């Protein structure tokens, strides 16, 4: 192999390895990029950090929306968790409070995070939560029980076609998660 | 044409050094032909390993109810079948073809980086062995689907880190192979072999290599995130820590969609090489083929979320990914048109490579059409994760990539071995494959439209009949591939006689590889050939 060719080869290899490294970085860059895009489209709540502000709505007494509450615990989270109200009829614009019950069933303190999900997804932006145990990580002492309120309202601008909204919470064990 | 069989053309080239003796030849070789052969043989073996897994799946699905395997193992089979076929069979087989043919097609003495070439092959073997080892680990092999979606895949037992490291190794192997292909094509072309004179197989591989370099690192990153989520308490995809499993799907399909084109673009290249030879016409629309390939490669990067229409994308996203996906039909249509136009009024003959290529054009087009159906976002909600998608991608992979790999086997085997294969058995292999592949996959369209989900070991009884038909097709298809193994061995041992240098009538007009003797000497084009103007420009 001539020296000229060797030089050309090592030049192209250097360039291509650089592309490989950049693309490896790009994979990781997709992580913050995804957050930004979710933020712009408002599509994905992920971990909601703060409460919605308490806006006064005109209450629409003529409409009734069924709100359902579903609870779940992720795979290995050692908790009992249930909604004290399974389902309720609400008027758009009016604020309601419902309670959830949770208990640490172990003899050690645990940290757990509830992740909300609203179905149908497109109704999400019309569902206002001004108080929720899901806004922060909950610490449970050994065998501790908690009654946790959620205060919410359905925005009266909710399109007519939505009759039922389902709010689901899943508790994840966060005891071992690195805080950032 | 009938293959021209030469009498006693024992024509050995005399070179300074030939291959090493014994087994060491294969371990330390840096010769592109040796490495190409190893890739091809390895790909063929893995084709049967993955095929055996497919037959386990089809046996279980022959009747409703659980018959042979437990559901966990069944899910391992669907996952491993896909991983083995993609990373162990199809990709290595095309890398093997690239190794054998690219230097000979562009008039180069070898690949640009021969030692790295050896390393990427052995790394592939190590990666696949590591993947296979997961079958015997506590908790079984990965069973969450080849897409390795969290959180399900994080529930894999002891096998998870091994599967992830195996993906890393396969990725590094492909990246090294791709760098080698690019360096070879850019730096080693014979004088006069301009880019737009290169055979299409070389062009499609050049573009494929760029795809690989762009996507394999992203996939490596995604599986590394899975690894740290599972073992180092990061939260890329863990909702509790502020992550999102849907993010994984975005990263995966940013890799995954170009990845499926990694398997189909070289397929297009081989089809564009074979069809003109047997139609006795230059390829119709050479330049448009090159541009269409580049266009498909570009589009592959901006359509990934069509795999995720049902995860809850914003409406704007659904619409964008729907229309962008539909765009792919245009360059693909250009290609199908060009292949058809190449055959139009050609003096066609129907030797085995041509039969497989024609079947590819017809059946790949069907797979493309079902793809177009699923690009329609609202309709996709019905098709998503059903047997319809299974039918779709198998039509674009089995009678496309696999058929073309078989075609290239028949087409170049005389050049590789110096002997002609048995045309009668080749045609038998073709007809058995072409008929059974449709018995195997066509009914899966009906099953999918009727709502049968994919990746299930048991199903409702209304799906029983078509599943039985599909399984029968699977067994005919699977066992008829053994004919190919027989033909390869028979041809190596002498076949039906010696092949000429040109092998196919006037083939030397279509590619430099037909200007060297058959079998191709251990070293070819140590001095660059003179490039005569080819017909396709």
Image: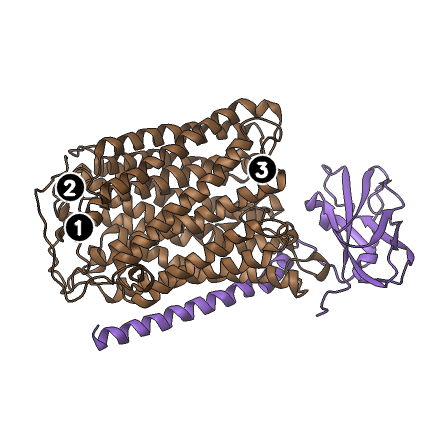
Between disc 3 and disc 1, the foreground one is: 1
The mark nearer the N terminus, 3 or 2, is 3
Residue B22 in picture, x, y percent from top left: 28, 59
Residue B158 seen in the current view: yes
Rendered purple, the chain in question is A
Considering depth in this image, is B187 or B522 the residue closer to the camera? B522
Residue B510 in picture, x, y percent from top left: 16, 47
Between disc 3 and disc 2, the foreground one is: 2
- Residue located at (71% from left, 62% from top): B241
**The numbered mark 2 sits on a residue in which chain?**
B
Q: Secondary structure at mark 2?
A: loop
Q: Secondary structure at mark 1?
A: loop
**The numbered mark 3 sits on a residue in which chain?**
B
Find the distance from the CA under tag 2 to the CA under tag 1.
14 Å
Q: Determine the image quadrant of residue A13.
A: bottom left
Q: Determine the image quadrant of residue B377.
A: top right
Residue tagged by mark 3?
B381
Residue B139 in picture, x, y percent from top left: 63, 50
Residue tagged by mark 1?
B519
Q: Are marks 3 and 2 in contact (CB under 8 Å)?
A: no
Q: Secondary structure at mark 3?
A: helix
Marks 3 and 2 share the same chain = yes
**The numbered mark 1 sits on a residue in which chain?**
B
Q: Are marks 2 and 1 in contact (CB under 8 Å)?
A: no
Chain B visual colour: brown
Estimate how packed mark 2 is, as few (under 14), some (14 to 19) or many (20 or more) residues with alpha carbons within 10 Å: many
Q: Determine the image quadrant of residue A64.
A: top right
The mark nearer the N terminus, 3 or 1, is 3
């Amino acid at each position: 192999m001539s020296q000229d060719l060797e030089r050309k080869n090592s030049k192209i290899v250097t360039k291509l390895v650089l592309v490989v490294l950049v693309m490896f970085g790009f994979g990781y860059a997709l992580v913050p990029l995804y957050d930004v895009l979710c933020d712009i489209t408002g599509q994905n709540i992920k971990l909601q950090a703060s409460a919605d502000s308490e806006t006064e709505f005109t209450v629409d007494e003529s409409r009734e929306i069924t709100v359902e509450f579903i609870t779940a615990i992720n795979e290995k989270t050692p908790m009992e968790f249930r909604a004290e109200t399974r389902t309720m009829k609400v008027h758009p614009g009016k604020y309601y409070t419902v309670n959830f019950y949770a208990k640490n069933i172990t003899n050690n303190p645990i940290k757990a995070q509830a992740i909300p999900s609203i179905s149908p997804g497109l109704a999400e932006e019309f569902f206002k939560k001004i108080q929720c145990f899901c806004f922060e990580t909950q610490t449970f002492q050994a065998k501790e029980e908690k009654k946790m309120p959620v205060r919410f309202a359905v925005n009266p601008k909710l399109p007519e076609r939505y009759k039922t909204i389902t709010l689901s919470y899943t508790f994840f064990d966060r005891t071992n998660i690195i805080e950032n | 044409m009938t293959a021209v069989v030469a009498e006693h053309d024992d024509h050995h080239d005399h070179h300074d050094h030939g291959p090493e003796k014994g087994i060491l030849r294969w371990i330390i070789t840096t010769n592109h032909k040796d490495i190409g052969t190893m890739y091809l043989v390895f790909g063929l073996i893995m084709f049967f390993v993955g095929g055996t897994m497919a037959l386990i799946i089809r046996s279980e699905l022959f009747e409703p109810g659980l018959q042979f395997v437990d559901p966990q193992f069944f899910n391992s089979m669907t996952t491993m079948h896909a991983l083995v076929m993609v990373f162990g069979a199809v990709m290595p087989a095309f890398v093997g073809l690239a190794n054998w043919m690219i230097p000979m097609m562009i008039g180069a003495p070898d690949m640009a980086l021969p030692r790295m070439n050896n390393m990427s092959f052995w790394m592939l073997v190590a990666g696949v062995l590591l993947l296979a080892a997961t079958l015997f680990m506590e908790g079984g092999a990965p069973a969450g689907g080849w897409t390795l979606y969290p959180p399900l895949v994080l529930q894999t037992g002891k096998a998870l880190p091994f599967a992830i490291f195996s993906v890393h190794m396969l990725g590094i192997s492909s990246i090294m192979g791709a760098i080698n292909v690019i360096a070879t094509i850019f730096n080693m072309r014979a004088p006069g072999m301009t880019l737009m004179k290169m055979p299409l197989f070389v062009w499609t591989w050049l573009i494929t290599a760029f795809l690989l370099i762009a996507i394999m690192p992203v996939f490596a990153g995604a599986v590394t995130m899975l690894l740290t989520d599972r073992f180092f308490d990061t939260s890329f995809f863990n909702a509790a820590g502020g992550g999102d499993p849907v993010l994984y799907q975005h990263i995966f399909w940013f890799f995954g969609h170009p990845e499926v084109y990694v398997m189909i673009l070289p397929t297009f290249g081989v089809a564009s090489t074979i069809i003109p030879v047997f139609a006795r016409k230059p390829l119709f629309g050479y330049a448009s083929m090159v541009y269409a390939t580049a266009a498909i490669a570009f589009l592959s990067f901006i359509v990934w979320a069509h795999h995720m229409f049902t995860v809850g994308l914003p409406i704007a996203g659904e619409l964008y990914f729907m229309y962008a996906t539909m765009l792919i039909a245009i360059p693909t249509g250009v290609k199908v048109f060009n292949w058809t136009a190449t055959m139009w009024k050609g003096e066609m003959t129907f030797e085995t490579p041509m039969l497989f290529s024609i079947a590819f054009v017809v059946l790949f087009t069907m797979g493309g059409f079902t793809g177009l159906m699923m690009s329609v976002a609202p309709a996709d909600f019905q098709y998503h994760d059903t047997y319809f998608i299974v039918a779709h991608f198998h039509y674009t992979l089995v009678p496309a990539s696999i058929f073309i790999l078989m075609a290239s086997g028949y087409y170049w085997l005389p050049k590789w071995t110096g002997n002609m294969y048995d045309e009668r058995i080749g045609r038998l292999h073709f007809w058995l494959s072409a008929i059974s592949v449709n018995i195997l996959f066509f009914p899966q369209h009906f099953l999918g439209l009727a709502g049968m989900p994919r990746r299930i070991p048991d199903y409702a009884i209304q799906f029983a009949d078509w599943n039985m038909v599909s399984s029968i097709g699977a067994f005919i298809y699977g066992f008829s591939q053994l004919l190919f193994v027989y033909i390869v061995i028979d041809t190596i041992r002498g076949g039906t006689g010696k092949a000429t240098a040109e092998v196919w009538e006037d083939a030397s007009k279509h590619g430099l590889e037909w200007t060297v003797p058959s079998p191709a000497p251990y070293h070819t084009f140590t001095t660059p050939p003179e490039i005569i103007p080819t017909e396709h420009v």
